[in-house]
Image (cartoon, rainbow, N blue to C red):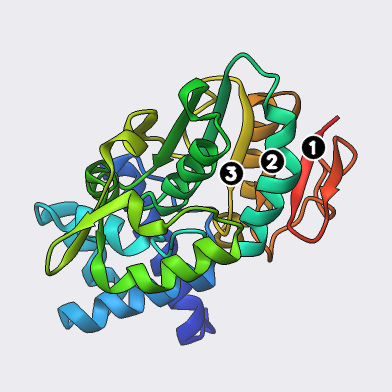
């Protein structure tokens, strides 16, 4: 029988086997992530570790202690900043916050929170609007390392100038510097901002619902998922939202092309904020 497989087809087979090995060893499932994103991260790790073939990486996952954890860090998406996309947070403050004021308690889930910047931003908005004391923010990620970092509330000092601009653009009405102290290298958030944020590990691919929420934020995460996985995660969010709850996704994400398009109304189409019907 003639072998007609191309190099690309062989690499696709190897990636399938690599992701299966990672799942078998760690329980973390990347088999339904967008293949282009995974392939870029695999190729980068191969360059760093001077590995010629993906099959060599599979062997290291199976037999080299600690190697799978290295790959899990590579695959985790950790791009974030405070008040990222300021127009979104401004719309949230102006249009959703007034609807929260009559609630006896407010439960918010930041799914895929990375190092916590968006959760910190939410805490600031709620504090300024007099709602923080009755709010609980659940900030989750699959990556335990970023969660441990987030819990400390420590930010790079060289990012604070751009964060201040974002905050003001997002409708901030205080001196942003009141929310942190500094040394020569870092900014340390006011501990009062952290008191109602709970950071813990949750994997959107394998873990289920853990509460009922008024708001779920999952912005710029599902762009890395296949359509099948997006459907699964959207079902998780739908099941986790209370009646009239809000789901916020990223600027490049939408529910319009999903099977859930009839289950939500466009509360703010521009900022990708949907309300459960």
**Residues tagged 3 and 1 counted as in contact (Cβ below 8 A):** no
Horizontal side, residue 235 vs residue 193: left or right: right
Give the x, y percent position of residue 149. Answer: 23, 49
Residue 270 visible, this orientation = yes
Instruction: Using the rendered view, name the quadrant where residue 187 is placed.
Output: bottom left
Residue that numbered label 1 is attached to: 275
- Per the model, the C-alpha gap separating discs 2 and 3 is 6 Å
Question: Mark 3 or mark 2, which is nearer the start of the sequence?
Answer: 3
In this picture, is 86 found above or below 115?
below
x and y percent of residue 224 in the render? Answer: 55, 61
The mark found on residue 247 in the picture is: 2
Identity of the residue drawn at 38% across and 49% down: 116
Q: Residue 199: give its label.
A: none
Secondary element under disc 2, as helix, strand or loop, is strand
Vertical position of residue 105 compared to residue 266: above or below: above
Q: Position of residue 62 (x, y in %)?
A: 19, 53
C-alpha span from label 2 to label 1? 6 Å
């Amino acid at each position: 029988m003639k072998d007609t497989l191309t190099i690309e087809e062989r690499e696709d087979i190897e990636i399938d086997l690599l992701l299966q090995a990672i799942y078998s060893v760690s329980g973390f499932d990347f088999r339904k992530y967008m293949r282009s994103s995974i392939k870029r991260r695999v190729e980068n790790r191969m360059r760093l570790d001077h590995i010629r073939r993906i099959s060599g990486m599979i062997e290291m996952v199976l037999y080299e202690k600690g190697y799978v954890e290295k790959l899990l860090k590579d695959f985790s998406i950790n791009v974030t900043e405070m008040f990222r996309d300021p127009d979104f947070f401004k719309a949230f403050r102006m249009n959703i916050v007034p609807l929260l004021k009559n609630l006896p308690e407010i439960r918010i889930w930041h799914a895929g929170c990375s190092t916590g910047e968006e959760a910190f931003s939410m805490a600031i908005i709620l504090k300024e609007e007099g709602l923080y004391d009755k709010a609980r923010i659940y900030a989750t990620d699959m990556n335990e390392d970023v969660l441990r970092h987030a819990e400390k509330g420590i930010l790079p000092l060289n990012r604070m100038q751009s964060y201040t601009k974002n905050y003001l653009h997002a409708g901030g009405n205080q001196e942003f510097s009141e929310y942190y102290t500094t040394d020569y290298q870092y900014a340390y958030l006011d501990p009062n901002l952290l008191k109602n944020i709970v950071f813990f590990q949750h994997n959107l691919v394998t873990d289920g619902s853990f509460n009922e929420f008024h708001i779920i934020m999952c912005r710029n995460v599902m762009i890395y998922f296949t359509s099948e996985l997006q459907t699964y995660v959207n079902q998780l969010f739908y099941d986790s939202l209370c009646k009239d709850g809000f789901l916020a996704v990223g600027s490049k994400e939408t529910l319009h092309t999903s099977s859930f398009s009839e289950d939500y109304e466009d509360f703010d189409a521009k900022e990708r904020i949907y309300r459960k019907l």
